[in-house]
Image (cartoon, helix red, strand yellow):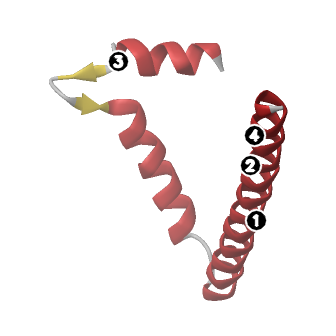
Amino acid sequence: MAWYAELQRIKWHCIKGFDAIRFYKKYQYDKWYDSLTNEEKEKLKEEQELRSKKTDMELCSALAQLSFLMEDVCRRALH
């Protein structure tokens, strides 16, 4: 992870604005995606939608908890 973060920070792999690593990742993904059947593509799409909904729900839950904590802190600060 630290290696990838450092790549993002310095962008040494970009030559004249061309990000070769991102291009290669997209190329590999597109190549893999094209090899899937229509049923597999549909299943992948459904899984991505479910994952997205789950992430949204987790975010809402975290924000609600944070809101509750902030309200409690403010209430204690005023008393």
Which SS class for mark 1? Answer: helix
**How far apart are the alpha carbons under marks 1 and 3?**
34 Å
29 is higher (above) or lower (below) than 19:
below
* Residue at the spot of label 4: 70
Q: Which one is in front in this view, the residue at disc 3 or the one at disc 4?
A: 4
* Residue at the spot of label 3: 11
Which SS class for mark 4? Answer: helix
Do the numbered discs 1 and 4 sit on residues whose CB atoms are within 8 Å? no
Q: Which one is in front in this view, the residue at disc 1 or the one at disc 3?
A: 1
* Residue at the spot of label 1: 57
Badge 1: how crowded within 10 Å, few (<14), some, or many (20+)?
A: few
Identify the mark at residue 67; answer none if there is no mark.
2
**How far apart are the alpha carbons under marks 4 and 2?**
5 Å
Do the numbered discs 4 and 2 sit on residues whose CB atoms are within 8 Å? yes
Which SS class for mark 3? Answer: loop
Do the numbered discs 2 and 3 sit on residues whose CB atoms are within 8 Å? no
